[in-house]
Image (spheres, coloured by chain):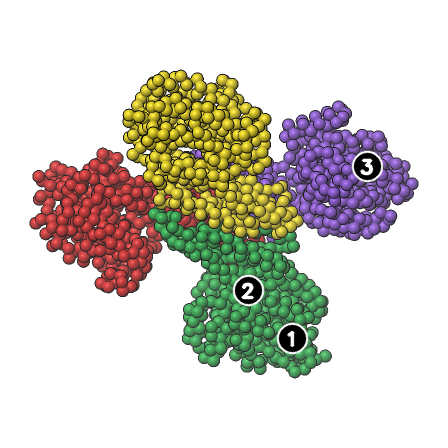
Chain colours: A purple, B yellow, C red, D green
Amino acid sequence: MAAEDFIKSIQPKLTEWRRHFHKNPELGFMEYRTTCTIGKELEQLGFKVYAGKDALDSKSRYGVPSLSDLENQEQQAKDSGIDTEWAEKMHGGHTGLVAVWDTQKPGTHAAFRFDIDALPIEEAEDEHHFPFQHNFTSNEKGVMHACGHDGHTTIGLGLAHYIASHHNELNGKFTLLFQPAEEGGRGAKAMTDKGWLDGVDTFYSGHIGIHSLPVGTVAASTKGFLASSKLNVQFKGQSSHAGMKPEDGRNALLAAATAAVQLYTIPRHSDGVSRINVGKLIAGNGRNIISDRGYLELETRGETQAINRFMQKEAKRMIEAAASMHDTKAEIEFVGETEEMVCDEDLVPFITEVVQPSSFIKEVQPVAFVSGSEDASFMMNAVQTQGGQATYMLFGTQLPDNHHSPAFDFEEDVLTVAVDTYIHIVKGGNSIA
Amino acid sequence: MAAEDFIKSIQPKLTEWRRHFHKNPELGFMEYRTTCTIGKELEQLGFKVYAGKDALDSKSRYGVPSLSDLENQEQQAKDSGIDTEWAEKMHGGHTGLVAVWDTQKPGTHAAFRFDIDALPIEEAEDEHHFPFQHNFTSNEKGVMHACGHDGHTTIGLGLAHYIASHHNELNGKFTLLFQPAEEGGRGAKAMTDKGWLDGVDTFYSGHIGIHSLPVGTVAASTKGFLASSKLNVQFKGQSSHAGMKPEDGRNALLAAATAAVQLYTIPRHSDGVSRINVGKLIAGNGRNIISDRGYLELETRGETQAINRFMQKEAKRMIEAAASMHDTKAEIEFVGETEEMVCDEDLVPFITEVVQPSSFIKEVQPVAFVSGSEDASFMMNAVQTQGGQATYMLFGTQLPDNHHSPAFDFEEDVLTVAVDTYIHIVKGGNSIA
Amino acid sequence: MAAEDFIKSIQPKLTEWRRHFHKNPELGFMEYRTTCTIGKELEQLGFKVYAGKDALDSKSRYGVPSLSDLENQEQQAKDSGIDTEWAEKMHGGHTGLVAVWDTQKPGTHAAFRFDIDALPIEEAEDEHHFPFQHNFTSNEKGVMHACGHDGHTTIGLGLAHYIASHHNELNGKFTLLFQPAEEGGRGAKAMTDKGWLDGVDTFYSGHIGIHSLPVGTVAASTKGFLASSKLNVQFKGQSSHAGMKPEDGRNALLAAATAAVQLYTIPRHSDGVSRINVGKLIAGNGRNIISDRGYLELETRGETQAINRFMQKEAKRMIEAAASMHDTKAEIEFVGETEEMVCDEDLVPFITEVVQPSSFIKEVQPVAFVSGSEDASFMMNAVQTQGGQATYMLFGTQLPDNHHSPAFDFEEDVLTVAVDTYIHIVKGGNSIA
Amino acid sequence: MAAEDFIKSIQPKLTEWRRHFHKNPELGFMEYRTTCTIGKELEQLGFKVYAGKDALDSKSRYGVPSLSDLENQEQQAKDSGIDTEWAEKMHGGHTGLVAVWDTQKPGTHAAFRFDIDALPIEEAEDEHHFPFQHNFTSNEKGVMHACGHDGHTTIGLGLAHYIASHHNELNGKFTLLFQPAEEGGRGAKAMTDKGWLDGVDTFYSGHIGIHSLPVGTVAASTKGFLASSKLNVQFKGQSSHAGMKPEDGRNALLAAATAAVQLYTIPRHSDGVSRINVGKLIAGNGRNIISDRGYLELETRGETQAINRFMQKEAKRMIEAAASMHDTKAEIEFVGETEEMVCDEDLVPFITEVVQPSSFIKEVQPVAFVSGSEDASFMMNAVQTQGGQATYMLFGTQLPDNHHSPAFDFEEDVLTVAVDTYIHIVKGGNSIA
């Protein structure tokens, strides 16, 4: 069966999967039901599936939810009927999975990465919102697939079906990484540190959307993702009655506010783009109390690891100085990280050659300029360090609203475009000639 | 019946009332059940009772809760069985009441003020906590009488019983003010502006506790309460993706943090004590978003109205400058106020003369030094402006924990001391000689 | 000769001295010519005079000028013709002197302190300015007696003349302290630490002016002087080209500015008056250079030593935190200090009794309320610690302009009032009855 | 005479000129003697010379020195013997000149720009310093050619000699711009606004040094200069005694420090490089005085005019907000500006073709990467706007110390390299073929 026919045959399934995942979104490291759904599908297809601590290095996970959040979510997953065996394997936030298909024939080892987590956003209930029109908005109040990872997961399943059904025509080895907790840069390092990128020759990942582009547009590579670090900070001081004993307070609100202002004064870096943002500040007990507690959420970014490390080092020293300024203590927790990301320019001509316009694909550009951060960077850097090649692609779709907004959506036709693209890559790189 | 016997007779009732109010705490301007309980008791005794908009000037209330909070609480009060008539009268946060007994005989017009509201604090469930031991901790999760106003309300009822049962021996006129929303300085101005202090010759209010003192200690006056203002501030900016378009943001978190830091730089005042505190700062949307919203709760204080006005003026200008600094807008809301408070020194010798040690009272001091702020100041200043005299007293009790803390409590014997004190004052000032 | 006649006889001399000192002002620890003039006069009168390191504990001096400033001023003093012997004795900023007259008869040991230094202010050349009208403005450009210490020195000489010419009528012992470097609180500790207050029974000092009062008004004591500390801070960072390598700078300007803002956020103290001021900030190399150097001059004050120590401790920690915030180092130098100052209430009735209205004195008040700081406090506290009594008085004069301003001046008649007051005190406390 | 021979013949003259200008440095808009020296030389050669208000648009000058500085310098120039006529023409800071040679033959109109001003830096007196070894260090204490403009001026004179002596072989028109006040971006706009770039077809300027490169290296274009703005700010408040009346002060030191800190929080710009620096902060009267005066020197930069305008707009609003924060007023003065600068890529191949290695030139690179800002940008943008072409070149030399440092120097052989380069450009573009 030609690729085009295969895709047409699987298109209804793609739609069904996408809507299922969209309706059942789960936050990072709590994708219990999602992982189970993917895992069962892939096992059925004949993939060797690795989950739980086999998929992730437990200690390399960033920003793992609290025990009580994990337990609530695990209970809910069990209540919804997932297998006890799967539940046990994933216990404690070990979600996501790795699926391997080894043709046993000599050839390239290609890895494909799909991120599966949702966001803490309350989905729009609006008649202009496509998922609302078609009745598949989120079942979980306050959780939403608002960045298209429901689509990414679906594309991964589509590609898996192709590999399983065409394995006779293929050579080499395929590793599909269904990664948890991409949001906040929390999950990729744990898969990478587990060794899943060892020996990989070519690595592919990508994103749908980012910019509004016509469906059918594909970019073979991207430029502009930044290395980044995510930090949470707790300031601990001493409360006191602000009228009676102001001198007895150690003002954690003032420490947090001082840190917030000062962090933006970190110098610009002459080697390239840098960023700093304090995105949340919560402090204080009551109007007439000198605050004993302040909390910050911040991120640094840099065009290179070196720039981001500079930002991080400055941020850390400044936070501690702000704490000391008001005689408080700061506890800094690193809760996420992404690395700089450079797509291999040698991989681009390969892609533009093998991925030709089709019923689904309209145009293949060599590169798209983006911004933001991506923890696929850990995987890419691991592959590149060993001499492999890696790229991060873009799959065009019109966007009715921004990523991470309550009315985010994408055109479902992009799913076929992406599956078609990956199939051409697989055929181009792993065909029995 | 002598005062001492009267008090002994009413003591069980005092304990019962206190525990009832403690168990059923209500926040400021939502004391629906409390007001109804007081009102029915006083009507039964023969007082003329004024409630709702008859007791308060509606527009002079500060920091009225949101409509939805009021409605929830009103519904709850109705569900608990309060009269429809009372409910209607108090609708929209018009709680508290004024009770008048006019002997129709020439004599002094004496006013007594009792505050009735509770605090948004979750009460300790601890075996060392007296209300827990005796099974009268708060029924309302997150609401607690943690400042002794349950005691104040009880003392008011005790005094009312005395007046009603001894009115033949008394002359002049008595006004009892059961004031809502003392916390935050929100309710007194509304009773004052309604005119209830017009024509009052002598005004008495007081507090149990403040410092830990032996039960039986009474101070005829206090020094040290500060004029104060309470402000809430909303900063409104423009959110933007902190990685992609930092220059498009108008950073409300940064505006709020800047304001917080800068407010503490208001100069000290050479005319006397001043205070500033930002007690709450909440800002931000998410780590990677430049924040479009910041919120502050703050207070200023001054030994005199002039000093507090200076603090307020500086604060206002600085908040607006901080908003402008980061191209945001600030909305400032005044949500509470107290005035400076000077007890009449002429009233002190009268009190120390008429209030003599008894079975309940051990020692009467002329003055106690305190700090904090009290909106009884509005009433006192109104009385003094017309040529009347006013004082604010202290009734000693050991305190196991600070006011406004989850384990706050007082010794119930202080109730009899306070009732005894007021009875002596009434007898001393309004007896038919 | 009666006191009144004595004063009349010496009045022309008082005027002459005052104008001489006014014309020849010298800054703290550089009063070479002034000290020499005083010393020779007192030696001639028969006082035992102690100067140089006999008068001061060298190490206890605060804020000693730089070696080159001292040497310039010493050379200038030599050029103006002061004795080599005196010059040697005072070498290195050991100015001021102590003069002792011991009657050898049993009696009180009374000490009187006069400060002798001028200020770095350029005197007004204005036809309304009395010293300009009478041709005795400062000969030293940029140096001026703008706080009346020329008058204080004169009063000391007047009192010395009285003691010398009336010693037969007196008993006990007299110590006259001509103190250098009062401005900035730099000289009193050095005299105190040298032991000159040991064994003193009664201590007197005072100020002319402060408030504008009629000449003839005398206050037996003052209230309101604050303990204080003076600090200079150097921030040292790393310069870098702001366009080319902003990340290589360690911004000392930013550290200094951060410190300046944050220092004003030190909390108010509930035990009494506190103050903080950064009075000078100089930082930066050039517009396009990240600054490697920043400099602050600041002071803290407190109603009590404890409050001032609190302010000092907070200031020190904050300065170091500001330095660390921008990866710089701070060097903090303490350059002056005054203590809290409480006049003995027992001394007041003595003074009001012995100092009666005269041709010169019109009215003696028990106390005057002032503000500011005075390092006579070190001397007073030393006396009081040993059981002696001390006071700091005020001598009224109209003031055409504020202290420390270019047009500051006082009415010369206040000199006779002060001398008369001290004579009455001497006669009252040290007469052979 | 071939170019090479011409250069050899003029080389002693180049050295002499360079050392003369180095020895007699003058600050921007006060290059009276320098301008006069250049002008007389060029007039002698037969150039038409335009000086004073004929060369500059008076109002378009930025950061003109104070009247008294101008007058002092003019007097000094007169005392050194410059013509009265020239002195009158340049009166009030109208220095620099434009020299035109029109061959009257059809051809290209080429403009060359040379900047002539020195810096407020005290030159090193150090045996390793070449000008010290050869006895031509600055005669003006505190003024130094520390950026190589003495060399630029010399190169201009060398080129002028070539044009004058070879005009028969040339066609078209030559405009030589000897620009004052390049430092701080103050002079170029005034020449541009006077219209001197109107009708220019090709524009050339350049710099010696910047990076340490071997003598003989030439770059045909540069990339990396940023648009920039220079601002001075005066904050005006109200002084008050910090101990007695802190509340009466309006603290200009605090306003300036607040502005300094906050300015660094201007967001990074996603369209490209931005910079902000506060390079000087001077505030305060004395330790115990609340400061009534604060002063800032700052600069903004941007990769594009739009980015720099964004920085400027933010800076302006923030400075005003900081002033308002502490109830002071800010006066902002724009004292310099440069524009973004894009060398024409079409001009590069022309240069690399006509400028071939010679006895002097070793290597011609197409582009050198630099940073900093250049007001030649005004001239380049004016030329490009009309359809002309412009470039800014680099002439390599080893640098013993950085630009703008007291020991800055360059290798004098670079002078012949630059003259040779410009001669080849002239021959290539304006030869009678």
Query: Local crowd at mark 3 within 10 Å, few (<14), some, or many (≥20)?
Result: few
The chain letter under disc 3 is A
Give the residue number, with chain letter if any, for mark 2: D185
Q: Quadrant of residue B303?
A: top left
Q: From the top left corner, tell me how far across and down residue C334 is, in percent.
A: 37, 45
* Residue C389 left/right relative to A326: left
Amino acid residing under circle 2: Gly
Q: In which quarter of the image is the N terminus of chain D?
A: bottom right
Which residue corresponds to the image point at 51% horizontal and 20% vertical from the top-left?
A: B136
Task: Find the residue positioned furthest to the front.
Answer: B104
Q: How far apart are marks 2 and 3 (CA)?
A: 64 Å
Amino acid residing under circle 3: Glu
Secondary structure at badge 2 equals loop
Give the residue number, with chain letter if any, for mark 3: A16
* Residue B432 left/right relative to A149: left
Q: Distance between the residues labelled 2 and 1?
A: 23 Å
Q: Quadrant of the C terminus of chain D?
A: bottom right
Q: From the top left corner, tell me how far across and down residue D229 is, in percent.
A: 55, 60
Q: State the residue in front, B270 or C63.
A: B270
Give the residue number, with chain letter if any, for mark 1: D199
The answer to whether dots 2 and 3 both sit on one chain is no
In the image, residue D425 sits, relative to residue B270, either above or below, namely below
Q: Quadrant of residue A378?
A: top right
Which residue corresponds to the image point at 13% horizontal and 51% vertical from the top-left?
A: C359
Q: State the residue in front, C410 or A347.
A: C410
* Residue B397 left/right relative to A149: left
Secondary structure at badge 1 equals loop
The answer to whether dots 2 and 1 both sit on one chain is yes
Which residue corresponds to the image point at 65% horizontal and 38% vertical from the top-left?
A: A336
